[in-house]
Image: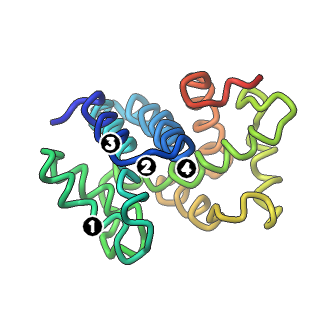
Amino acid sequence: MITREQALDILHEFVQSPSLRRHALQVEACVAAYARSYGEDEQQWSVTALLHDFDYEIHPTLDLHPMAGSPILEERGVPAEIRRAILSHADYSGVPRESRLEKVLFACDELSGFISATALVKPTRSVADVDAGSVKRKMKDKAFARAVNREDIVNGAAGLGVPLEEHIEFCIRAMRERAASIGLAGQ
């Protein structure tokens, strides 16, 4: 097993974009909170979240990301369970989501980005001022954060067997706990 610090080293080696680094930390906040909630291995789940898009800058196309990144992670000693979860977060990879970790990673990926976008349009630019209602209203606005796949957000919650509003609130709370380190503490 690799540590969170080793995962951050890999992330920083391959990801130069501050926004993509923040995205990894935001997904980690949600995934780690679910690990605690389910009594799972928080370090393993954190590492998975941190590395899920580590290869996006070097493999920015659907035919490569995240598939071409998996051998890099294998060379770095990342366990197969984590690599599989990373592969499963992309529907087009052909790797079905079976484990709880795989389902949680998928459920938190797009949603954490959408919560972040919602926070950043608030006057305070803080996740503290975001609630499930504001997220759901923004989801109806197709022009807002148009790159975020709303269907993935809905399907992610369904895959967890959790009502959408409950999943959104859970992730908001998780992101509030780490607001400063994920760039959403506001101005």
**Which residue is disc 2 drawn over?**
104
Q: Is residue 44 above or below residue 59?
A: above
Q: Do the residues labelled 2 and 4 touch (CB within 8 Å)?
A: no
Going by the numbered disc 2, the residue's amino acid type is Val
Name the residue beneath numbered marker 4. Answer: 162
**Pointers 3 and 2 in contact (CB under 8 A)?**
no
Residue mark closest to the camera, 3 vs 2: 3
Q: Earlier in the sequence, mark 1 or mark 3?
A: 3
Q: Is mark 3 on a helix, strand or loop?
A: helix
Residue pictured at 52% horizontal, 58% vertical: 156
Q: In the image, which is nearer the foreground, mark 2 or mark 1?
A: 1
Of residues 120 and 141, the one nearer the viewer is 120
Q: Residue at x 23, y 60 (%)?
A: 70
Q: From the viewer's perspective, is 65 left or right of 139?
A: left
Secondary element type, mark 2: helix
Q: Earlier in the sequence, mark 2 or mark 1?
A: 1
x, y (%) of residue 170? Answer: 59, 36
Question: Disc 1 versus disc 3: distance between alpha carbons?
Answer: 16 Å
Instruction: Determine whether, in the image, residue 34 is placed left or right of residue 185.
Output: left
Q: In this view, does 61 lie to the left or right of 165?
A: left
Q: Kindly indicate the quadrant of the structure image that contains residue 112.
A: top right
161 above or below 125?
A: below
Give the percent coordinates (x, y) of residue 173: 62, 29
Q: What residue type is labelled 4?
A: Val
Q: Residue 6 carries which label?
A: none
Secondary element at tag 1: helix
Element at label 4: loop
Q: In front of the other: label 1 or label 4? A: 1
Name the disc covering residue 68, or none. Answer: 1
Q: Nearer the viewer, residue 182 or 156?
A: 182
Viewer-closest of 9 and 105: 9
Q: Name the residue under label 3.
A: 13
